[in-house]
Image: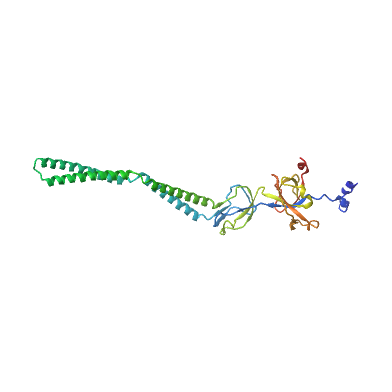
Amino acid sequence: MTGFVCAIPLIASIFGGCAAPAAFAVGYVEGEYVLVAPIEIAEISAISAARGDRVAAGEVLVQLERSDTEIAVAQATASLAQAESQLADLRQGKRPQEIAVLEATLNSARAQAVDADLTYSRQNDLLKRGIAAQSAFDDASTARDVARANVAQAEANLAVARLPARVDQIAAAEAAVAQARAVLENARWRLSKRSLSIPQAGVVFDIIRNTGEVAGPQAPVLSVLPDGAVKLRLYVPESALSAVAVGSRLTVHCDGCGTGMTASVTYVATDPEFTPPVIYSLDSRQKLVYLVEARPDPGANALKPGQIVDVDLDLAAAGR
């Protein structure tokens, strides 16, 4: 009899027994927006997206002023080249031109030594024959010794010139090269961050700052809602809290959303709160409820931030 009465709309509207069963919980859809902001303060040069535009993953949305970072890259590149040149110079010793000068000095010293040896031999022979004085022989002997010492000194100078720098000098130069390379990598990284994008596809929700304004880590340029980045914030009466837990399956209903949408519970609050204003009703405004968050299953594209939803426990899933 009740089913027949409820089938007649006019009677059903005034017959209390025809009221639809209450939902397990009521709540709303919340978007998890991505704020697109630079890592450091910079002026906005161009914005290539408008509010409501769909953007692809990795698509450049904002260009920031690049002059300072381009200069930093150029300076770091020059510093690295200088450090590498200094290291190469220390590793190879003197320049070829300097080596050539030292080789010529050695050849001259050797020629003088040969001449000094001949003079010494001649003065020694003359002294033995009683023709030369002892002083002349002594002068020739001293000149020979000096010439030989000059040869030894020239050979030592040439050998040292052909050696690379000391080990500690080379180690210091290698460290300078590593430091300069790190500075260059950092400068290039900073330059790359002057083009802003997001790793997921989505829809531009809002333009927060415009071209010519200054953006920074705490001053984003725009916000994007990535695909699927929504969650349900539900409010469960205390009497029903024991029926839900993390992992519980829910059936989701909302106006114009169609059927078959489901979600999984990801969070259950431990402290109660009063029903929030967004879902006030005459029956629930004074009740204590518990916040429950749920993640819609993939494919729930009809859910939009701000929508009011009600959910039921998926009894079939709960029974498994």
Please name whichever residue, 18 or 271, is drawn nearer the observer in this view of the structure.
Answer: 271
Q: Residue at x 17, y 44 (%)?
A: 141
Q: Position of residue 61 (x, y in %)?
A: 58, 52
Scheme of image coloration: rainbow
Q: Position of residue 5 (x, y in %)?
A: 89, 48
Please name whichever residue, 143 or 76, is drawn nearer the observer in this view of the structure.
Answer: 143
Q: Is residue 238 visible?
A: yes
Please name whichever residue, 99 or 246, is drawn nearer the observer in this view of the structure.
Answer: 246
Disc tally is 0
Quarter of the image with the C terminus is: top right
Q: Quadrant of residue 207?
A: bottom right
Name, please, the residue furthest toward the bottom. 213
Name, please, the residue furthest toward the right. 1
Say left or right for 176 vs 224: left
Q: Is residue 182 above or below residue 122?
A: below
Q: Is residue 308 visible?
A: no
Q: Position of residue 185 (x, y in %)?
A: 49, 49
Say left or right for 191 vs 318: left
Say left or right for 295 vs 151: right
Say left or right for 197 vs 238: left
Q: Position of residue 219 (x, y in %)?
A: 59, 58
Q: Residue at x 49, y 56 (%)?
A: 68
Please name whichever residue, 180 or 208, is drawn nearer the observer in this view of the structure.
Answer: 180
